[in-house]
Image: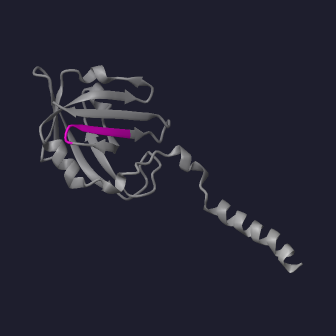
């Protein structure tokens, strides 16, 4: 008889424990399951090795890849990012950092590696200015994503080696 009375209490305790450990907004946050395997030094070395081109750029609600057609991007060891098409040259900055703060726009609350890009002009290049999260990278491809905290839009940027 005592066992029967304890079962509802045990069930209620288990339900409360499980409910308190769930976080309803986890489903809306992008996470990189391989983020712990990302080496800042490896990403830096990969980016610095040669010239890259933008093969895909999606800004919140539209594709803008054509803004970067024929531009080669060079990631300098001094943090300088140079984009040139033979006629025009634009200079910005870049870095790869470990972000522990959780206060970035994407809603992440754990440590992650950011691929930071900064251009002040022209406007098309300034759109690349973000603290991008690394989706994946290899010797020939770097895929990045940024989730805006303002409007919740998602930006995608993919570089491929020239």
**Residue 78 relative to residue 123: left or right:** left
**Residue 17 relative to residue 104: left or right:** right
In percent of width and height, residue 133 lies at 35, 45
- Between 3 and 11, the residue placed more toward the observer is 3
Q: In the rendered view of the protein, which quadrant contains the N terminus?
A: bottom right
Q: Is the magenta stretch mostly helix, strand or loop?
A: strand
Q: Residue at x 18, y 45 (%)?
A: 46
Colour pattern: one colour
- Between 126 and 112, the residue placed more toward the observer is 112
Give the image quarter of residue 49.
top left
Q: Residue at x 47, y 49 (%)?
A: 107
Vertical side of 82 occupied by 20: above or below: below
In percent of width and height, residue 40 lies at 24, 54
- Residue most extreme to the right: 1
In percent of width and height, residue 41 lies at 20, 54
Give the image quarter of residue 16.
bottom right
In percent of width and height, residue 26 lies at 54, 50
Q: In the rendered view of the protein, which quadrant contains the C terminus?
A: top left
- Residue most extreme to the bottom: 2
Vertical side of 153 occupied by 98: above or below: below
The answer to whether residue 18 is magenta is no
Q: What stretch is highlighted in magenta?
A: 139-145
Give the image quarter of residue 134.
top left
Vertical side of 142 occupied by 3: above or below: below
**Residue 22 relative to residue 86: left or right:** right
Q: Which residue is drawn at 31% across and 28% down?
A: 56
Q: Residue at x 61, y 62 (%)?
A: 21
Count of marks, rendered view:
0
- Residue most extreme to the left: 86
**Residue 15 relative to residue 63: left or right:** right
């Amino acid at each position: 008889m005592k066992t029967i009375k304890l079962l509802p209490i045990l069930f209620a305790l288990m339900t409360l424990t499980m409910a308190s450990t769930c976080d309803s907004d986890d489903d809306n946050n992008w996470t990189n399951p391989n983020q712990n395997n990302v080496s800042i030094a490896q990403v830096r070395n990969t980016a610095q090795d040669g010239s890259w081109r933008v093969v895909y750029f999606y800004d919140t609600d539209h594709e803008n890849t054509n803004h970067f057609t024929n531009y080669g991007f060079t990631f300098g060891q001094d943090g300088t990012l140079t984009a040139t098409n033979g006629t025009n040259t634009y200079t910005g900055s870049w870095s790869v950092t470990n972000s522990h703060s959780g206060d970035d726009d994407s809603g992440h609350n754990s440590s992650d590696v950011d691929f930071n890009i900064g251009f002040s002009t022209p406007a098309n290049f300034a759109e690349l200015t973000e603290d991008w999260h690394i989706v994946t990278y290899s010797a020939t491809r770097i895929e990045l994503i940024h989730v805006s905290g303002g409007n919740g839009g998602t930006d995608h940027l993919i570089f491929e080696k020239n």
